[in-house]
Image (cartoon, rainbow, N blue to C red):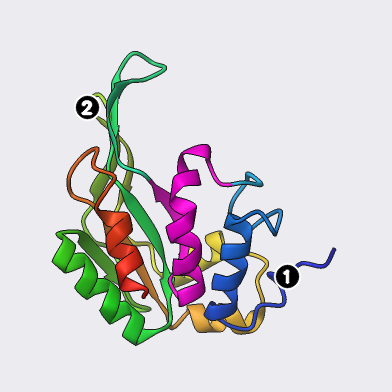
Amino acid sequence: MSNPWKKAESVSELGNLMADWLEGRIPTRPGYCDTRPDEETNHLIPVLAPACRAGFVTTNSQPGHPPVRGYDGRMWRQRAWVEGWTADRALLSQIRSAMKRAGMTVIAHGPASRGGDWISLTEAGDEIQMAAGDYLGHRRVINSEWRGIGRHATNELRGATHIDLIDPVWGRDDRLWPALANAIR
């Protein structure tokens, strides 16, 4: 089977491919070592796949999860979060507006963005396990997340916006996803 990612000509085409991967029609995706989304993502696929098809190409996400004792004996908690890319300025505006109305945090990085402040997404005890907000720059992120895609799609990503959407309330998993679904309608 040929690599459909290598044939992608645009961010929009990447979105359609990502939706197909989320829904199980494509076996792999760039920048991801597993062949399927994490099990915790399954209930998010009905929102993530349409978001990808609408032009917000999601690359990573997690549900909110209240504190629970983890495998290591520490208390683990996480915020609902999704990150991705869009080259559609109108969609970016819709997403920002919908997230603001829902009380979510939006961090957007354009092609010239660098740095930023970390926002903890997953904690175990007093240690941050995963965070969002700091940004290494488009070229680095594209090279790590999108290795093996078409040249035209890569060029369009270089001018796109990278977005983090975060529910600021630990453990809550019922606000971010409906707000994102609203934003892409």
SS of the residue under disc 2: loop
Residue 123 as seen in the image, left or right of residue 4: left
Percent x, y for residue 78? 29, 38
Q: Nearer the viewer, residue 88 or 134?
A: 88
Which residue is depicted at the point 57% across and 56% down?
A: 22
Residue named by callout 1: 4
Quadrant holding the N terminus: bottom right
Residue type for callout 1: Pro
Q: Nearer the viewer, residue 86 or 144?
A: 86
The answer to whether residue 172 is above or below residue 74 is: below
Label 1 – label 2 distance at C-alpha: 42 Å
Residue named by callout 2: 126
The answer to whether residue 163 is above or below residue 153 is: above
Residue positioned most to the top: 73
Residue 136 as seen in the image, left or right of residue 101: right
Percent x, y for residue 119? 23, 49
Q: Which residues are magenta?
A: 37-62
Magenta: main secondary structure equals helix
Percent x, y for residue 123? 28, 33
Evaluate whether residue 133 shows in this view.
no
Sort mark 1 into few (<14), some (14-19) or many (20+) by Cα contacts within 10 Å. Answer: some
Sort mark 2 into few (<14), some (14-19) or many (20+) by Cα contacts within 10 Å. Answer: few
Residue type for callout 2: Asp
Choose mark 1 or mark 2, whichever is in front. Answer: 1
Of mark 1 and mark 2, the one earlier in the sequence is 1
SS of the residue under disc 1: loop
